[in-house]
């Protein structure tokens, strides 16, 4: 992912956010917001609130690594092999299309 001109590895952010006791499954993905512009978004399945997740990110991640969108889900999409399907997350939640 590219966050503010910096290359960011999703597992680094996911590992930090997953440390919240009520986060559940966690994933991050780059979401397009306009042509050529994107943000990092966090998705999780647990009972943690967006404010709790954001506070955790602010306490332990550099500003450019902190997600800008917080989206709780019932379940994360997975590939047939069980990996998180970031493409499905990106397509379902992108903000650059109506």
Image (spheres, rainbow, N blue to C red):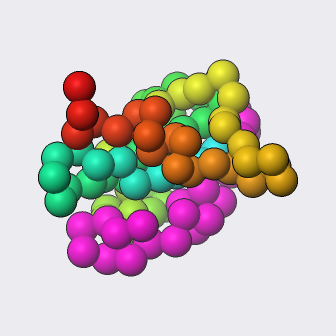
Q: Is residue 56 above or below residue 11?
A: above
Magenta residues, start to end? 1-25
Asked whether residue 46 appears in the rendered view, the answer is no
Name, please, the residue furthest toward the right: 81
- Please say whether residue 55 is one of the residues in the magenta stretch: no
Q: Nearer the viewer, residue 8 or 64?
A: 8
Quarter of the rendering containing residue 12? bottom right
From the top left corner, tell me how far across and down residue 46 is, in percent: 68, 29
Horizontal arrangement in the rendering, residue 20 relative to residue 61 (left or right): right
Residue at 66% from the left image edge and 22% from the top image edge: 74
Residue 43 appearing in the image: yes
Residue at horizontal 68 percent and vertical 50 percent from the top = 84
- Residue 93 in percent (x, y) is at 41, 34
Residue located 24% across and 34% down the image: 97
Q: Where residue 24 sits: x, y (%)? A: 72, 36
Identify whether 46 is placed above or below 41.
above
């Amino acid at each position: 992912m590219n966050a503010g001109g910096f290359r960011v590895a999703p597992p680094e952010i996911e590992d930090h956010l997953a440390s919240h006791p009520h986060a559940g499954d966690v994933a991050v993905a780059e979401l397009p917001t306009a042509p050529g512009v994107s943000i990092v978004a966090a998705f999780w399945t647990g009972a943690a609130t967006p404010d709790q997740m954001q506070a955790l990110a602010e306490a332990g991640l550099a500003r450019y690594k902190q997600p800008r969108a917080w989206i709780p889900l019932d379940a994360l999409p997975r590939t047939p092999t069980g990996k998180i399907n970031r493409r499905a997350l990106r397509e379902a939640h992108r903000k650059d299309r109506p």
